[in-house]
């Protein structure tokens, strides 16, 4: 029940059938180049808004026309082998995490967007043969991109929803990145490797995937699917250990086989983990928030079990995801102190703060600042900010207290999307990733820009 066997197009509607596995999958030669179609349709078990398991039809809506489409609704008839209707469904467009998009969202020409249809089967023991999907929509004029075409020094590497990036070499020639939902464990992502010398990407496998065995899940106590989905299981890129959280958000580290478990922090059930920022020698910053606009709570520690910062209740809440120093003892964060809103260098151990500069921060969905020590002391800090409604990359020099503007960024973030960034070891490139309907992956060549290109400390 995973293959499309016919496509019937009208101006505002489309019907397609999911047939049995043995039905040949359409090839590029039999998919019309000027129509609105669905691809990769499959049935799966999912959870609705009430956390109930239900059967769903999911796939991608692909717009090969010259028009945009909005007000999109999807209707399904579930059929048995005799062609009788044994169920029905209604659905909508979704992001990679399965969350519904606003009705006024438009699928632009030459783009695709996921959809999800909840199926209601009339009889529990019914034998499903096909699912017929009808898509209704309203054609509208395409929205011209407001992004400038002349992003000198910035190369777009992917148009997918990229949620994880990791440089594989010091020079920035090879990058591994994950595509999918940022809330999912990394094993659920689709992985690719970008070759900057060739300028292309190829599918790859995250090498840690093979370490996630049933024995490991049993050892960690996350064998249950819900516990595993909630675990945020992550292998350190700078040390031979892993991190995961329990169903009540206790943070644990362990060896790759699940042995020698160590408690990192507990009393975290009130907070929602959103990710990790990694530092040398297995040190990390874990950051927590509920939704865009919420204050960010955080702590720093080591996968070996050492706590660096105070507890999550004792670190100063930030208006952005904070960027840690290499030792985890300080962070670049944003807050308001004595009526002054700006970027601060704050201790994670005590209460000391130092105002770097006064400015309005962009929010917790922008990438964290990147702190780069330089020879002779001090640091240069890469910042991702909104300046006059334009996302920009800037760099603050702590020695001269100078804020240098580098370039505009091709980011289009809304309240439901986020961005991440990673600097190469030699400081020559930044990988910028974003999810959401305007997601993608960009490589920023810092050597193309003058000023504030760091000389890394030895």
Image: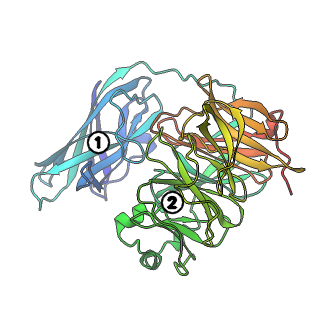
Q: Residue at x 45, y 56 (%)?
A: 184
Quadrant in the picture for residue 76: top left
Task: Look at the picture and state if 280 lies above or below 98.
Answer: below
Q: Considering depth in this image, is 396 or 244 the residue closer to the camera?
A: 396
Q: Nearer the viewer, residue 429 or 18?
A: 429
Q: In the figure, 343 relative to 267: above or below? A: above
Q: Is residue 356 left or right of residue 75?
A: right
| Visible residue check, residue 3 | yes
Which quarter of the figure is the N terminus placed in? Answer: bottom left
Can you see residue 286? no
State the residue in front, 232 or 376. Answer: 376
Image coordinates of residue 222 in percent, x first then y, are 41, 71
Q: Which residue is mark 2?
A: 186
Q: Is residue 102 left or right of residue 348?
A: left
Residue 202 numbered mark, or none: none
Identify which residue is drawn at 54% across, 23% down.
Answer: 145
Give the colouring mode of the picture.
rainbow
Q: Please state the total of marks drawn on the protein image.
A: 2
Residue denoted by label 1: 6
């Amino acid at each position: 029940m995973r293959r499309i066997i016919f496509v019937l197009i009208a101006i505002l509607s489309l019907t397609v059938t999911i047939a049995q596995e043995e039905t040949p999958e359409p090839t590029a030669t039999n998919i019309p180049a000027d129509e609105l179609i669905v691809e990769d349709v499959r049935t799966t078990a999912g959870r609705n808004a009430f956390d109930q398991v239900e059967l769903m039809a999911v796939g991608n809506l692909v717009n090969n026309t010259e028009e945009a489409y909005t007000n999109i609704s999807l209707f399904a008839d579930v059929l048995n082998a005799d062609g009788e209707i044994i169920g029905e469904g209604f659905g909508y467009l979704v992001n990679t995490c399965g969350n519904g998009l606003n009705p006024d969202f438009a699928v632009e020409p030459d783009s695709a967007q996921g959809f999800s249809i909840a199926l209601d089967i009339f009889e529990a023991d019914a034998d499903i043969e096909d699912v017929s999907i009808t898509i209704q929509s309203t054609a509208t004029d395409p929205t011209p991109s407001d992004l400038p075409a002349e992003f000198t020094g910035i190369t777009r590497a992917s148009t997918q929803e990229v949620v994880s990036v990791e440089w594989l070499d010091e020079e920035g020639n090879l990058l591994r990145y994950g595509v999918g939902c940022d809330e999912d464990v990394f094993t659920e992502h689709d992985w690719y490797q970008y070759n900057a010398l060739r300028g292309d990407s190829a599918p790859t496998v995250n090498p840690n995937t093979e370490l996630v065995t049933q024995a490991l899940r049993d050892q960690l106590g996350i064998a249950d699917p819900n516990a595993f989905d909630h675990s945020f299981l992550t292998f350190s890129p700078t040390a031979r250990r892993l991190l995961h959280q329990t169903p009540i958000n206790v943070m644990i580290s362990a060896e790759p086989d699940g042995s020698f478990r160590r408690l990192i922090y507990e009393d975290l059930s009130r907070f929602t983990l959103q990710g990790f920022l990694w530092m040398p020698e297995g040190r990390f910053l874990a950051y927590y928030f509920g939704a865009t606009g919420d204050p960010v709570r955080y702590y720093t520690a080591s996968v070996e079990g050492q706590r660096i910062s105070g507890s999550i209740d004792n670190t100063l809440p930030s208006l952005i995801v904070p960027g840690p120093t290499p030792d985890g003892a300080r962070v670049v964060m944003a807050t308001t102190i004595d009526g002054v809103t700006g970027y601060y260098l704050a201790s994670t151990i005590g209460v000391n703060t130092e105002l770097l500069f006064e400015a309005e921060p962009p929010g917790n969905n922008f990438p964290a600042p990147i702190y780069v020590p330089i020879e002779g002391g001090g640091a240069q800090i890469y910042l991702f900010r909104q300046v006059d409604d334009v996302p920009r990359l800037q760099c603050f020099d702590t020695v001269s207290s100078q804020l240098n503007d580098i370039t505009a960024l091709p980011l289009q973030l809304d309240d439901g999307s986020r961005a991440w960034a990673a600097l190469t070891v030699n400081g020559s490139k930044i990988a910028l990733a974003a999810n959401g309907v305007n997601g993608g992956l960009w490589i920023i060549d810092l050597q193309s820009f003058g000023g504030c290109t760091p000389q890394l400390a030895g």
